[in-house]
Amino acid sequence: MTALIMGILNVTPDSFSDGGRHADPEAAIAHGLRLRAEGADILDVGGESTRPGAERVPAALEQERVIPVIRALAAAGAVVSIDTMNASTARAAIGAGARIVNDVSGGLADPELLAAVAETNADIALGHWRGPSADMYARAQYGSVVADVRAELAERMAAAAAAGIPPARVIVDPGFGFGKQGAQNWELLHGLPRIVGMGPRVLVGTSRKRFLADALEDRDAGEATEVRRDLATAVTSVLADEAGVWAVRVHDVAATRDALRIAGLGKGTDPWSPTRSR
Ligand code: PMM
């Protein structure tokens, strides 16, 4: 089976990678529908930037940004996830039709979040996280990054179970770029089979991240352009797919869809089957 594609819909004025293009709800809804038409299986709506150095935004402002967008996209039949670290936003988003709560902090940032999700039928994506974006690189100290991420994700899975969330509703995400420096991300990418071996569905988000841009920079080109980052993302998404992940979270849905399709040709599976699932 080919990995599902989660399309990123950041409804923020300061996202590092789509630069606040979708801060007004109408534009965000239109972009979400376009991502769906391009092949996104899930739309991940977020109202708070987690870019390195980002400050937190109040939950009320986050909800003002995301709730109308979630309501419209869910009403149009899309599977929507809410990218939030706040229990109150998770609750409101599920009320508006979101089916997955995507918490990059794995339930650590808001101690109420896991219990809030447990009361619903929503799935939870638990990200590997070592602390707020404002100073996350200070915590990028690992013995073995893959072994440490595995162990810390297992702790978050145990916390989700203790809060009453059945294991079948849990997704794990190794958190590329979150408290990880350049080379640690590559080690994690090639260690993905060991994360997949943990059991739950695995979600992976490498899209346009700094470690890709750093790898692309060369003497002539300077800062990697968005187009080059999207191509790099399509490559890392194929590698993640080959490791057996359940879904990849990307900005450029069309490029990743094409890459997954090309990589899957001749393998005896039809990555285009509308019933494909993982
Ligand atoms: N990365 C970002 C935001 N949300 N969610 C998951 N599950 N995994 C990620 O790696 C992840 C995420 C930061 O990137 P963005 O600002 O481009 O959305």
Image (cartoon, grey):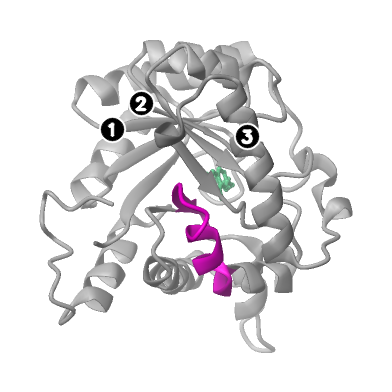
> What's the residue at 45%, 27% (across, down)?
166
Q: Secondary structure at mark 2?
A: loop
Q: Which mark is residue 177?
A: none
Q: Is residue 130 left or right of residue 150?
A: right
Q: Are marks 2 and 1 in contact (CB under 8 Å)?
A: yes
> Could you tell me how far apart the alpha carbons at marks 2 and 1 are, in whole angstroms?
7 Å
Look at the image and say whether residue 205 sits in the magenta stretch: yes
Q: Which residues are magenta?
A: 189-207
Q: Is residue 40 left or right of residue 77?
A: right
Q: Secondary structure at mark 3?
A: helix
- Say which amino acid is labelled 3: Ala
When asked about the image quadrant of residue 76, the answer is top left
| Residue to which mark 2 is pinned | 99
Look at the image and say whether residue 113 sits in the magenta stretch: no
Q: Nearer the viewer, mark 1 or mark 3?
A: 3
Q: Is residue 3 above or below residue 20?
A: below
Mark 2 and mark 3 lie on one chain; the one further toward the N terminus is 2
> What's the residue at 81%, 48% (across, down)?
136
When asked about the image quadrant of residue 8, the answer is top left
Say few, some or many: other residues with alpha carbon within 10 Å of mark 2 (under 14 / 14 to 19 / 20 or more).
many
Q: From this viewpoint, is residue 185 visible?
A: yes
Pick whichever, 27 or 233, lies toward us.
233
| Residue to which mark 1 is pinned | 79
Pick whichever, 31 or 62, lies toward us.
62
Q: Which quadrant holds the N terminus?
A: bottom left
Q: From this viewpoint, is residue 128 visible?
A: no
Q: Is residue 265 left or right of residue 235?
A: left
Q: Which mark is residue 158?
A: 3
